[in-house]
Image (tube, rainbow, N blue to C red):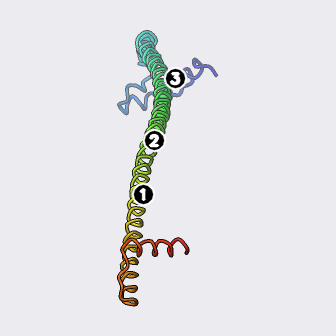
Amino acid sequence: MSIFTLITSAAETAAAHGDEAASAGLPQLDPSSWPSQLFWLTFTFGILYALMHTKFLPAIGGAIEERRDRIADDLDKASEFKREADDAENAYNQALADAKAKAQGIAAETRAEVDKDIAEMQAGTDAALEQQVAAAEARITGMKADAAAKVREAAAETARAIVETLIDEAPTSDAAAKAVSTVSNAS
């Protein structure tokens, strides 16, 4: 069905009921005012259509296009920032690895220096201990010799006292020392 046929049938129906509508006080239902109403409807629709077509829809389309462009730019910026953040993270990880390697190198170098210092100190301490041991051994040897000399002297004095007691005659110190020396060499 076409619009014209629809309007015509509506007009006929309204004409049949037109007298009732006019008496009821509804002028828009009076078929005699329909041509002017159709004119103003068409005129208003045409103006609104022209305004929508020339002003409002292009403005809305421009706003939508501008929004799309802004979103695309924001996505491009976001991907650029992500790339920069990834580059910064890689640089950070590289710097961290370099710092760890450098720290390990410094630790190894310090450990080697400390080990060297400890070896030097230990060598110095060993040498000092060897000197002290040698000095102590020399003192011990000297003390042994002194002790042996004193023991011989005491033995000679004891032998001289025993001989004097036994035979009532005192032997000379040289004879007593010679007797003790002969006995100690024999053992």
- Where does the image place residue 106, in percent across and percent down from the top left? 44, 36
Name the residue that disc number 1 marks: 133
Residue 116, label in figure: 2
Name the kind of residue labelled 2 in the image.
Lys
Amino acid type indicated by mark 1: Val
Query: Residue 102 at what x, y percent from top left?
Result: 46, 33
Distance Cα–Cα, label 1 vs label 2: 25 Å
Give the image location of residue 61, x and y in percent: 46, 16
Relative height, residue 112 to residue 144 (above, below): above
State the quadrant of the N terminus: top right
- Mark 2: few, some, or many residues within 10 Å (few <14, many ≥20)? few
User: Disc 1 vs disc 2: which is toward the camera?
Assistant: 1
Q: Is residue 104 above or below residue 134?
A: above
Camera-nearest residue between 133 and 73? 133
Residue farthest to the bottom, as pictured: 166
Pointers 3 and 1 in contact (C-beta within 8 Å): no
Residue at x 49%, y 25% (from the top left corner): 87
Checking the image for residue 61, the label placed there is none
Q: Report, in whole angstroms, how far the alpha carbon at label 3 lies from the one at label 1.
A: 140 Å
Count of labels shown? 3
> In this view of the protein, can residue 32 be seen by the observer?
no
Q: Which mark is residue 11?
A: 3
- The quadrant holding residue 30 is top left
Disc 2 from disc 3: Cα separation: 118 Å
For label 1, the crowd category at 10 Å Cα-Cα, with few meaning under 14, some 14 to 19 and many 20 or more, is: few
Quadrant showing the C terminus: bottom right
